Image: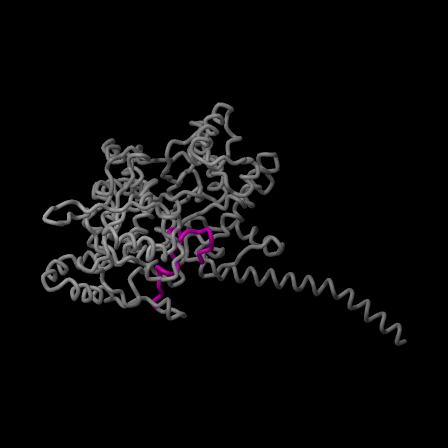
Amino acid sequence: MRRGGHAEALLLRRRRGPARLWVAVLALLAGTLWLLSSSSSAGLGLGLARSSYGLQLDSQFKVLTLTSVLLLKDVDVNKLWRTADSNGWRASSAPRTYWPPPPIESESNGYLRVRCNGGLNQQRSAICNAVVAARIMNATLVLPELDTNSFWHDESGFLGIYDVLHFIKTLKYDVRIAMVIPEITTNGKTKKLKAHQIRPPRDAPVTWYTTVALEKMKKYGAIYLTPFSHRLAEDIDDPELQRLRCRVNYHALRFKPHIMKTSSEIVNKLRTEGHFMSIHLRFEMDMLAFAGCIDIFTPQEQKILIKYRKEHFAEKELIYRERRLIGKCPLTPEEVGLILRSMGFDNKTRIYLASGDLFGGKRFMKPFKAMFPRLENHSTVGPGKLEENTRGLAGSAVDYMVCLLSDIFIPTYDGPSNFANNLMGHRLYYGFRTTITPNRKALAPIFMDREEGRAASFEERVRQVMFNTHFGGPHKRVHPESFYTNSWPECFCQPNPRNHADKCPPDNIYEVLESQFQSVEGEEDIEEVKSTNQTDSTSQIEELVV
């Protein structure tokens, strides 16, 4: 009896095991469905979370993945036209600790002159770094020089692109800025102070500026750092210096009125029929040659790319399939169209294209235009007079502003693309505006399967990748993501934070800085300071919009 009873109990437990497992699975499914559907942070109907705190899909959890795929079919893509969920954060780059004003002329350690090389946005980052470097060295910054001729064949320079007066006024609490290095008088003779030229190391630490650079500055009175691209490390422990970068990037650097006016005309026309998205289509010769993704082109086009690569980049063996699988190949226009269609955007979607000359000609754009015919750029969207203001650096500046103000921004290649990376950071700062960033590494095998005839569940697989993102909401910065791409949390705050360090500074922070500034400058400057106080105390990015 005892043996028989034991056997029956054992058999019963074996029968109950699978049943209990199914109950657990069903409970997990129910719980997952409830969590997803009740998520307030998603902003997407049935709740794929937009923030970094949202649910992360993992291929190891098959049930969870299956549930997510089922829910994706009912996602309301129209809600992507709204801004991402802020989770209570707002932009703030104002100092949160004692921030002494810049030195008076007699106390400055010398003059810092820099030459910013590269494209418009690489130069923009360099300008931010130059201001921080001047602050670090207690120096006077000479208005940065832009190396416009070698890259753009454009002589406009800083004076032709940015509002100089606004730049100087906005940063008056941070650094002293001079238009040029002054003349000096020695032994009764007047001559211009000559800056000692130095080639700074790439990503130089703060200590390099407080030792090597500062020593030369004190010796010669002025130093000239050239080239000055990526010459200050992005990872700085002092959050106040990081916030200074944001003040320069998002407040002080305002384009000239004619650029802002042109951008405003384009945006207004695009908005006449509702929302519009902007796409930075990085399918240009330099980027394709850099990435080594040439197999999709004709033999003649491949020769052009190979020649360009040999002339401009270090020699390295690059295998197309391997490069593509690790996400190093720019998306083709057709792939961008397939992504948008899979996400649920229809052929009525209005799209502004920001790009240079696409390599490969019209044949690469034809499939994209067939899916999304309502394409515009700064040459087609407005009257002919717009073309006069959209050449060289100014053209890149117009594209930048239109992409900044668009409802949705899609960078198709955020690798070494300063334009895309800076825009993502600017849109994050500008109210968490929706940014859709394709995960090229995750998408590559899906596209390659399709090309090889395995297209089953193609759209569902694409949607699963594309909706597993923060969509421009606050998220942790993880290397190699740049500070200029994501300045959270240093340049953001919360009115009611859990962590005291995240608390927003008082509303009168600029009054405090004004008081400190006046005490250093002296009574003779008080009236001038008062006259410009309204512009300088603007704490939101609205000052960039005409």
Residue 477 drawn in magenta: yes
Foreground residue among 451 and 171: 171
For this orientation, the residue located farthest to the bottom is 2
**Residue 493 pos. (x, y %):** 35, 63
Of 106 and 415, nearer the camera is 106
Q: Which image quarter is the N terminus in?
A: bottom right
Residue at 49 percent of width and 41 percent of height: 339
Is most of the magenta stretch helix, strand or loop? loop
Residue at point 44% right, 51% down?
481
Confirm whether the magenta stretch covers residue 44. no
Residue 4 appears at what percent x and percent y?
Answer: 88, 72
Nearest the eye: 495 or 318: 318
Which residues make up the magenta segment?
Answer: 476-495
Q: Does 195 sit above or below residue 51? A: above
Q: Horizontal and vertical percent for residue 437?
A: 45, 47
Residue at 16% across, 66% down:
519
**Residue extending furthest toward the front:** 187
Instruction: Indicate the position of residue 514 as horizontal and vertical percent values.
Output: 19, 64
Which of the 4 quarters of the picture holds residue 324? top right
Asked if residue 465 lies left or right of residue 268, the reply is: right
Taking 541 as reference, is 18 above or below it? below
Left or right: where does residue 377 sit relative to residue 523?
A: right
Q: Please give left or right for residue 241 compared with residue 41 in the image.
A: left
Check the image and report above or below for 1 versus 212.
below
Q: How is the image coloured?
A: one colour
Q: How many marks?
A: 0
Residue 18 in sight: yes
Q: Does residue 82 appear in this view?
A: no
